[in-house]
Image: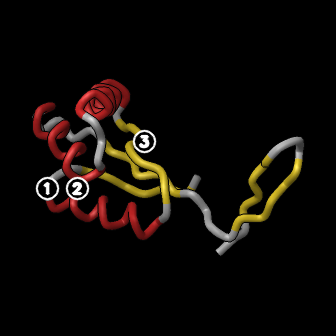
Amino acid sequence: MAVKEKVQGKGKLLPSAELEYILILHNDDVNTFDFVIDTLVEVCNHDPHQAEQCALITHFKGKCDIKHGEFEMLEGMMNELHRRGLSATIASN
């Protein structure tokens, strides 16, 4: 795993062994807004307003960053989104 440096304070660089990853939801033109919103609330622990905003962004832009964090956590969420018929990927930040 590559080492990423994070800036903290006044220009200090601190090494970090953990990369942050991004869970991305992709538009599929199949699932309803309500289904996507409910799924984001249940799977990603979004509040309803946040889930609605992510659903709208996904609809209009084709994709949306829905969660940031460690790969293992996001992988579990991605797998559950796939199980529920949503299209999602993980990218490194």
Residue 60 in picture, x, y percent from top left: 32, 24
Q: Is residue 87 above or below residue 73?
A: above
- Please report the residue visible at 42 percent of the width from the left and 41 percent of the height from the top: 65
Q: Amino acid at mark 1?
A: Arg
As drawn, is 66 to the left or to the right of 6?
Answer: left
Q: Amino acid at mark 3?
A: Asp
Compute the Cα span from label 1 to label 2: 5 Å
Q: Earlier in the sequence, mark 3 or mark 2?
A: 3
Residue 46 in picture, x, y percent from top left: 30, 41
Q: Earlier in the sequence, mark 1 or mark 3?
A: 3
- Please report the residue visible at 30 percent of the width from the left and 59 percent of the height from the top: 78
As drawn, is 77 to the left or to the right of 33?
Answer: right
Colour pattern of the rendering: secondary structure
Residue 70 in picture, x, y percent from top left: 49, 63
Determine which residue is flagged by label 3. 65
Q: Amino acid at mark 2?
A: Leu
Q: Secondary structure at mark 3?
A: strand
Compute the Cα span from label 3 to label 2: 14 Å
Q: Is residue 85 above or below residue 15?
A: above
Contact flag, marks 1 and 2 (Cβ < 8 Å)? yes
Toward the viewer: 90 or 76?
Answer: 76
- Please report the residue visible at 34 percent of the width from the left and 34 percent of the height from the top: 62
Q: Secondary structure at mark 1?
A: loop
Residue 80 in picture, x, y percent from top left: 22, 61
Toward the viewer: 38 or 32?
Answer: 38
Determine which residue is flagged by label 1. 84
Determine which residue is flagged by label 2. 81
Q: Is residue 49 above or below residue 6?
A: above
